[in-house]
Image (spheres, rainbow, N blue to C red):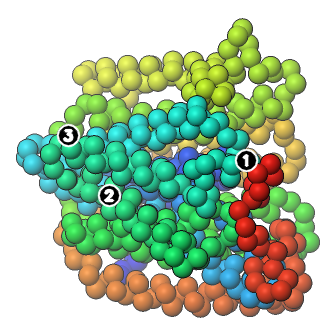
Amino acid sequence: MDMTIIPWQMILLCGLSLCVGWGIRGNFGHEYGAALAGALAAMAIVLLSGREDWWRYVHYFALFGAIGWSFGGSMSYMMVVGFSHSSHSPTVLYGFANLFVIGFLWAALGGAGTALPAFLIGFDQNETTPLLSVFFVPICAVFVGWSLQAVLMDRIFATKRMQRHENPLYWYDSDWLAALVAIVAALIIILFRGRIDMGTSLILYMGIGWFAAFLLLVNVFKLRMTPPRGDNWAGCVGMVVGVLGYCWHYKLGGVAFATLMTGFAGGIAFSFGQLLKQLCIRTGLQTNWHSVMEQLQGLLFGLGIAVTFGFILNRTPPLAANPSFPPWIEIFAVFCVLIALTYLNYRKAAQTWVDILDSLPERMFGLPIVGWFRHSRGWIGWFELFYIGLSIALIAILTVNLRDPIPLISTSWLGKGQLLYLVFLWWIVIFNFERALVNFSPGRLITEGVITLNAIICTILVAIGAQIVPKQTGSIFTFSDWLWKVSVWGIVIMVVTTFAFWGIKHALYGKQHAPGAALHIRFGEDSNAPKAKPKAGEPHP
């Protein structure tokens, strides 16, 4: 593995991009928040990779990167963070080990999603449509299925988040229903197409893998990472195994390498970021160290996936220079990144304004401020109306530009990619700041201030970096030997870093509980980990 060819500009931009996205993710949370960081990092890699053939696919990399990084947002990890602060030594070791596991799972799926477009060469069965395009109908089907699931669950049960354990479909606080809906959506597409293709196959591998691991690890072996918090970590184990099985089936060794390499780098990033937080707390200085931890984790995640892509820059096959994608797919990819992804996050911001500002009523002229397209919230509010307007404008502009290029939009794919990156970057940075503005305090400077500063640096890098980065060319490469090396060394690094971080925590705090998190003890007579499902009428821990 030759690291000398990896452009430092790409590594820096990707690191800062994921740092920005991860800091914003911390304010919105879960799958949709993590997807912001994934889209931004994927575009950063493509734009400063030196691969001109990748520029044509920048919006597809962004979409698949967002989807890949989103899955990890389903995992609960705050109690694991608390374990690493504990006064109980075995709990601390358990905490750092599971931080590595969570980081591995999160980054592995992110790396797989980001890498997939780079290895999908050739055409579908009709020999005219690029192979990548077969994924979009199944993706749409899954998105529609999840949307219907959210609407129906809200309409039928309307369970509040802190009382979600009272929902009759509650099963270890997991996303089992979403996994089932994805499988059903794929099966419907298979029924209509009359065959299983690479798009539907990936969904089945991941969905079935989710259930296999969840049933085996949680229901059979009773392995619960943070009871009574959710056990989606087990489902993510199954999805990673499913992705690797998919790569073996379709001979996508490069995607498997990116999955494992990014995963192990992510394990280090997630656990080391938490250790750095403890080192900072030990200084005695007072600030929002949790936000510092999140942004450091994002930075390290970004460096990990950037180095991974550095290794495969010249080892992925050349992509078609002028692929014939159906126009709706071109528009759909950009729409998902700029409209759908930002709306799903920033409707939470609009709700924050309503909750904090006394001068802002919940309804104006009979419409709610934000309706979430949910029955319990009023369906369509002012926020939705404005986003519908933005949607119409974007679709109209992109449609016209496909027929007759608009002067505002560059005719070069590098220029289009830079425009997409910068619009998306500042869209999420400004909206994140507006969310915090209604309740701003000096402590927010460590979050919004640092995010804005990093975004300025990213703007400079993306604007001039592509002119500096040496051009790269693709080639065919077999990753079989690399897969074994990465797997072996990754496991060794996991063991060594876990024990090293455990030892450093004790060197810093001895047997005392480290400040910055509630006291959690996972094992022994003093364990305070709940063992039973939360009772009805009580808030979910």
Q: Give residue 524's mark.
A: none
**Residue 122 pos. (x, y %):** 14, 54
Picture quadrant where residue 118 is located: bottom left
Residue 314 at least partly seen: no
Q: In the rendered view, does 170 fall on the left or right side of 515? A: left
Identity of the amino acid at label 2? Answer: Leu
Identity of the amino acid at label 3? Answer: Phe
Lower position in the chain sequence, tag 3 or tag 1: 1
Find the distance from the CA under tag 2 to the CA under tag 1: 31 Å
Picture quadrant where residue 72 is located: bottom right
**Residue 283 pos. (x, y %):** 88, 74
Q: Is residue 55 above or below residue 487?
A: above
**Front-most of 123 and 299?**
123
Q: Residues within 10 Å of mark 3 (few under 14, many from 20)?
A: few
**Residue 49 pos. (x, y %):** 37, 59
What residue sits right under mark 1 in the picture?
Answer: 163
Q: Is residue 163 above or below residue 430?
A: below
What residue sits right under mark 2 in the picture?
Answer: 204
Q: In the rendered view, does 274 fall on the left or right side of 338? A: right
Q: Are marks 2 and 3 in contact (CB under 8 Å)?
A: no
Give the SS element for disc 2: helix
Q: In the rendered view, does 401 fall on the left or right side of 533? A: left
Find the distance from the CA under tag 3 to the CA under tag 1: 39 Å
**Residue 9 pos. (x, y %):** 48, 61
